Amino acid sequence: MIFNKQVETYSQQHELLRPGDHYLLGVSGGVDSIVLLHYFVNNPMLNKQLTVVHVNHQLRPEADMEAKFVREICEAYDVPFMEKIIDVQGIQKSEKIGLEEAARQGRYRCFEEVMVSVEASSLVLAHHADDQVETILMRLTRGSQGSGYAGMPIKRAFSRGQLIRPFLAVTKKDIMLYAKANKLKHVEDASNAEDDATRNRFRHHVVPLLQQENQQVAKQFSAFHEEQTDLSEFATTMMLKQIEDVILKEDKRYVVQIEKFKKLHKIIQTLMIRQVIRELLPDNSVSISKNNIIDVLDLLKAASPSAKLYLPSGLQLFRVYDEAYFQFDNMEKSERFYYEMQPLTTVQLPGNGSISCEILTEDTIIHPEKTQLVLNATDIEFPLIIRSRLPGDRIKLKKTGGTRKLKNILIDEKIPQHLRDGIPVVTDAAGEIIWLPTLKHSAFLACVNKKQQQYLIQYNSL
């Protein structure tokens, strides 16, 4: 039959059917799934290991009768049968979603449970080319994200294996002709004739208009799907090659290097953001909307050095100068501290680093760096104080003799807000700031003079 050849060629082209696979068929009792079951049962390459799962949504009086109908067909074919009963209205209430979406979520949860329990490697669904047309039109109309506009994937990873749709190769008309030729009985879902569901309205009113314009519209949409899928896969491959250089994984957060990010094409930028969110929210990334993605991109591209964005599921994005952080909790603020230091001692700072004080000798190694400070013994009074910053802190500058606010220095140095309390401030006993290790020396900085007693104050990072 032409039908069999179409499905076979399509399956080979997309590598859907694999030797030795245990196929789990989703069978509702409608003509599409009954034809799917018949096709597999009568194909000697595919009928070695089959299981049928029927999901009873309990939404119509005929639901139990339909489950019995599928069970009897499976018994006649000698194919293992499993029925799963779900509470769609309960799912709708708990998840606060529409009835259609609740039924879909419940159905796929059942598919996954059965797939694991029977150790199936491929879930097979009977979606066909006309279903694909409807799906693409619905997503274009309501909006989607990325490859979602391409419609239903021909295959994708699912549970412990893959989900495949070999009937995307054929139309509803092809399926009806196959059923007629093989005298297959099936059940009719009366709700399919109503316009309550979105898909039904597209099926009854929109798709027929397109078919009047072009009888090959399903073929055209199939070509559109494959082209969009190929473009999406190519873009994703390019994104994955670059993401590790732009977005770093740091403990439980992701750090975006903003200047590198800005140089990327917008498509790659968008895919990177989706990838990060997908990894941070593996179970509910669907809750991230297109507007959320736009908000993230706006924050990363803005001129403002600091910003915060609240995303669904408790995810937050913080921008701090040239970096942005995806994480769930507020950034931990640096611990505040206060220590007194005498000569020939070392103070261990919270977190990382230490500051030591030694008497300068001829053997002391001096580096012209901001990690060392030389002081004349006559210029200071001990104990030195090592503390966190305080409001109004100012430091006396060596060259100008004037003072400058510590706050402005930290801003100029682009120190993130949440790290500023961790910057050590060194003062003398009178409270005069003499040093900001690694950042700024004060007017107290002395030149090395072997004729007088001097101290070397040194910051050591861990």
Image: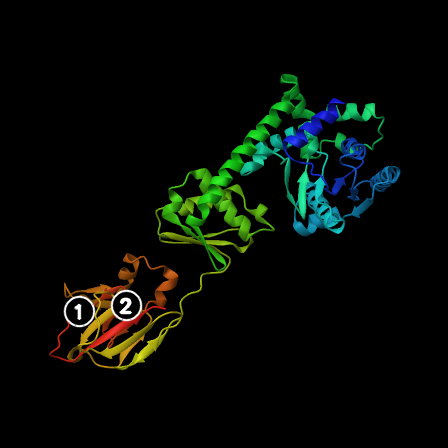
Q: Pointer 2: residues within 10 angstroms few (<14), some, or many (20+)?
A: many
How much space separates mark 1 and mark 2, taking CA atoms? Answer: 14 Å
Which numbered circle lies on residue 443?
1
Q: Tell me what residue is drawn at x 66 percent, y 50 percent.
A: 95
Give, as a three-letter code, the residue at label 2.
Pro
Residue 337 visible in the picture: yes
Asked if 288 appears above or below 353 in the picture, the reply is: above
The C terminus lies in quadrant = bottom left
Q: Position of residue 15 (x, y in %)?
A: 65, 35
Q: Tell me what residue is drawn at x 61 percent, y 30 percent.
A: 137
Relative depth, front residue between 373 and 396: 373
- Label 2 residue SS: loop
- Label 1 residue SS: loop
Q: Tell me what residue is drawn at x 82 percent, y 24 percent.
A: 180
Asked if 236 appears above or below 218 in the picture, the reply is: below
Q: Position of residue 65 (x, y in %)?
A: 86, 40
Q: Pointer 1: residues within 10 angstroms few (<14), some, or many (20+)?
A: some
With 46 as the anchor, is 337 left or right in this view? Answer: left
Relative depth, front residue between 421 and 260: 260
Give, as a three-letter code, the residue at label 1.
Ala
- Disc 1 or 2, which lies upstream in sequence? 2
Which numbered circle lies on residue 437?
2
Q: Nearer the viewer, mark 1 or mark 2?
A: 2
Q: Position of residue 53 (x, y in %)?
A: 78, 43
Residue 203 visible in the picture: no
With 339 as the anchor, is 66 left or right in this view? Answer: right
